[in-house]
Structures are given as C-alpha cells and as structure tokens.
C-alpha cells in the first residue's frame, strides 16, 4: 500500500474493502493512527445473494455473527483498544485496499447516467431532497450496498448528510415532506414498522408496542415512493473537535437508569447523545452519577425528546479528558439487552 493511505481519514458511512476481500462498515469519526474502527459487513461467499463483477457476496447482519466470523477466520481485525477500553473490530491501514466514500458515489451517479433502477431511484431521492432543502449536493452521500454496487432490487437507500447546519435543514425538510401527500416521501406505516421490528429484534430486544410508539416519531427513516430509506446525520470534519487519545474511556460495568432528558439537540446525529439529569440508578453501582447517554448506532437516534423521563440500560463508561476532568456516560447498542424507553410505557 502506498504511503498516502497512511494518512487516511475515514468516517461513519464510509466502507472499506481489504486485501483479503472483506468489506467493513466504518464506525464513528475517531480512529487510532494505524487502523480504522470498522465492522465486517460483506464477505465473498459462493452461496451469497449479492453479486459484483461475477463474484458472489453474503451480507453479515448481527453484531454477534460479525464477531464470530472474525474470531474464527480473520482474528487480525479484532483488537483491544487502550483508549476506548474494549475489544473492537478494526482494519489495520496496511490491510486497506479501497476506501468507498458516500459523497463520491452521489457525484458519480450525477455525472454518469445509470440504467440500474435502484441507483436511479436513489439519485432521484437525493435530487428531491437537495431541491427542497438546498443542502449542497457535495454534502450528501449514498452509503450501504448502493455505494458498493452490491444492492439487490429490495435494497433500501442509505443516505448521509454532512455538516451540522445541513443536517438540521434536512431534518426539517423531511418533517415537511412527510406531511405532504404529493412529495413521494412518507413515514413508515404499521406494516413497515412491524417488518423493521422483526429485523431489529436480532440485535435489540424491545416490546413491539414501545418500538412502534418510538419509531413513529422519527424522521430519519421512511419511504421514497416504494423504497425504504434511512438517513444518517453526521457532523463534518471541521466540526469534529476530538482527536484519538484526547479522551480516555474506561468501562465501569452495566446499569439500568431512570433520568430526565435535558438536552436532545444531538439526538439526530451519529453518534447520538442525550444530556440527562435527576439520574437514578435502578440496577448497577448506586454511587455512579451518569450525566449523558451515547450511542454509535443509528437505531438509537431520535429515541427521546427534551423533558421526557426515560429508563435506559447499557454499559457505563468513565470519560477522562486531558485536563483530568471526568464524567460518566451510558453507552447503548453493544448488547441485545440495551434499550432506552420513555418512563410512561406500561412494559417497564
């Protein structure tokens, strides 16, 4: 690999192909200097249902399945990270063959007309959102299977918006479009949500009634014509104010808490965060004073609003900054048992 790859900047929504033909989803915006934190997503498999250049691929879905695959065959992509204080999946820079960037895919499809129906619909959706929101086209990206050319007729549209201001404008636009009958952009109906629930249940357990109530209030997902879409909102590079090593994260066990959401202004972003107060430890170390809930998984975006009292369960982590300031946060999404629900639900 040439040396310029060593200065790589990869972020959430980018995809990485390795020299041994694995394809990984990049996670988060902060990575160690010698590797990119990313989770395996596609593998070459003669029984796979995805095809590219006459090679068949299989999509790996659940987190546990991904980890088992790497443990059994590709242990070089599992490592202990001393800054994040846990074992993670990550691609060493020397193993990186291709970096796929969502914004480049949008520009490529705009420049070169495609006959592929899924790609056509995806780029029309991008143009529709651009025309309505005025978010610059170069600040929009297409991720997921479309970015790789590994999509099927059933594949959904994974869209990325870059930059805080652009994200807020796009979120407002989606809210408006979902109320307009002629916009072709609609929220999920009951059948769509039940289908989503059966898919999500592999990784996140939650009573159906609660799932329906929470997911109905989200604008980051829905349908464009007959095609599912999911949108990730990311801050842009010049808005990332943390470098790898600026903070250290120490696992402090698990907890179930009750708290009030006092700031949900970062709830649409990936990673998402919620500032909390009046925290009560229901299970776990009672002396822990948790001030924040964070998740690196899109499914926990728009999960609660300001003023709401929630109950949440996840991993407790101590964050230590360079000036030795520290606080505790609750991380959601590492385990199937992690959740966040508003307190009034009868299922708690």
Image: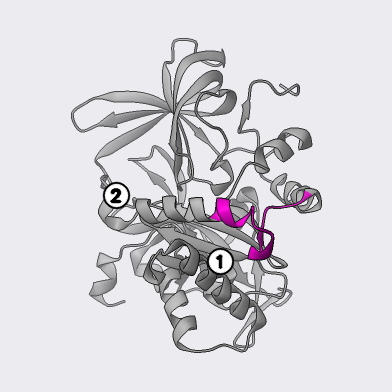
User: Pointer 1 and pointer 2: residues touching (CB < 8 Å)?
Assistant: no
Q: Would residue 157 be seen by someone viewing this image from the given angle? A: yes
The magenta-colored residue range is 174-189
Residue 69 lies, in percent from the top left, at 61, 58
- Position of 296 compared to 73: left or right? left
Element assignment for label 1: helix
Q: Determine which residue is flagged by label 1.
A: 144
Q: Does 348 appear above or below 224? A: above
Residue 162 lies, in percent from the top left, at 39, 59
Q: Residue at x 48, y 89 (%)?
A: 112
Q: Determine which residue is flagged by label 2.
A: 240
Residues 5 and 12: in front is 12
Q: Residue at x 44, y 86 (%)?
A: 111
For marks 1 and 2, give the CA distance.
23 Å
- Position of 32 compared to 330: left or right? left
Q: Residues within 10 Å of mark 2 (few under 14, many from 20)?
A: few
């Amino acid at each position: 690999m040439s040396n310029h790859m060593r200065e790589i900047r990869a972020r959430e929504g980018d995809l990485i192909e390795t020299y041994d033909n694995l394809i990984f989803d990049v996670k988060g915006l902060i990575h160690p200097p010698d590797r990119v934190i990313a989770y395996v997503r596609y593998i070459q498999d003669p029984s796979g249902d995805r095809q590219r250049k006459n090679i068949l691929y299989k999509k790996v879905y659940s987190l546990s399945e991904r980890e088992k695959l790497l443990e059994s065959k590709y242990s070089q992509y599992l490592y202990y990270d001393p800054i994040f204080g846990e074992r993670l999946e990550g691609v060493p820079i020397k193993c990186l063959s291709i970096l796929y960037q969502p914004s480049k895919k949008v520009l490529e499809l705009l420049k070169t007309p495609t006959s592929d129906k899924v790609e056509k619909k995806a780029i029309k959706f991008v143009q529709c959102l651009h025309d309505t929101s005025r978010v610059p086209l170069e600040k929009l990206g297409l991720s997921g299977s479309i970015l790789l050319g590994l999509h099927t007729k059933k594949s959904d549209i994974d869209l990325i918006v870059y930059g805080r201001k652009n994200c807020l404008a796009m979120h407002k636009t989606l809210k408006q479009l979902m109320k307009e009958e002629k916009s072709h952009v609609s929220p999920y109906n009951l059948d769509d949500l039940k289908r989503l629930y059966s898919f999500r249940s592999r990784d996140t357990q939650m009573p159906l009634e609660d799932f329906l109530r929470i997911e109905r209030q989200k604008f980051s997902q829905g349908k464009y014509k007959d095609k599912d879409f999911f949108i990730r909102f990311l801050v842009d590079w010049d808005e990332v104010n943390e470098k790898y090593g600026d903070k250290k994260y120490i696992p402090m066990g698990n907890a179930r808490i009750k708290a009030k959401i006092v700031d949900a202004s970062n709830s649409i972003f990936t990673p998402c965060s919620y500032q909390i107060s009046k925290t009560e430890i229901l299970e776990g170390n009672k002396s822990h004073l948790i001030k924040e809930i964070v998740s690196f998984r899109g499914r926990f975006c728009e999960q609660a609003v300001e003023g709401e009292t929630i109950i949440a369960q996840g991993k407790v982590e101590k964050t230590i900054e360079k000036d030795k300031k520290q606080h505790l946060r609750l991380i959601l999404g590492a385990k199937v048992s992690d959740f966040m629900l508003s307190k009034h639900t009868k299922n708690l």
